[in-house]
Image (tube, grey):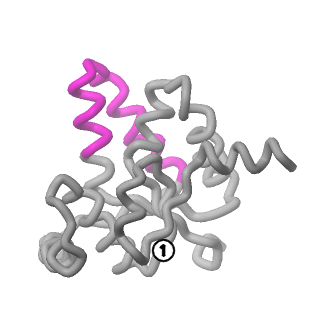
Amino acid sequence: MRSQMRRRFIDSNIFIYVLFKDPRYGIACLRVLEGIEQGEEQGVTSTLVLSQVVAHLARRGKGEAIKIFIDYIRETGIEVMETTFLDFIEAVAEMSRRRLNYNMWDDVVLSCQMRRAKIQEIYTQDRDFEKVGWVKPIFPQELDNLHKIK
């Protein structure tokens, strides 16, 4: 019954920190993905995110991990939205409305995709999403800190 689960978007840095076993963020990001794997919620991402992750793997000389990453996405049932030209058109308008700098281009495109999918929350380590008023970023390491307090 994934259609009735809470849906959250997954930013590229979540995957990247797990793939590269980042000492600061890797474990917290892994816990997010494990929750999705276990069916606690529905993960949603986009072809833009997949492209960002694959490009990062290629730049870092980890081409062999690309197939593993794509297979992982397929096997876990993470929903992948197509990136469309209309997302770009909406992003240009959104950047103008909010007077955002174009160094946030990818983030704004992702936020437009989220709006199209009616998803407000995104797992990310990118504070720039706080500048997009209606997007609620969820920072995995802060979730980890909350769990430690309880």
Q: Is residue 77 above or below residue 136?
A: above
Q: Which residue occupies 47% across, 44% down?
A: 14
Q: In this figure, what is the number of numbered marks? A: 1
Write down the residue under mark 1: 120
Q: Is residue 139 above or below residue 101?
A: above
Q: Which residue occupies 17% across, 60% down?
A: 101
Task: Find residue 144 and report its horizontal and vertical position in percent.
Answer: 70, 44
Q: Which residue occupies 26% across, 55% down?
A: 48
- Picture quadrant of residue 92: bottom left
The magenta stretch is 52-76
Circle 1 SS class:
loop
State yes or no: residue 68 in magenta.
yes
State yes or no: residue 119 in magenta.
no
- Picture quadrant of residue 34: top right
Q: Relative to residue 28, is residue 89 drawn left or right?
A: left
Q: Which residue occupies 62% across, 72% down?
A: 6
Question: Which quadrant does the N terminus fall into?
Answer: bottom right
Task: Find residue 26 and report its horizontal and vertical position in percent.
Answer: 55, 32
Q: Relative to residue 101, is residue 67 drawn left or right?
A: right
- The chief SS type of the magenta part is helix
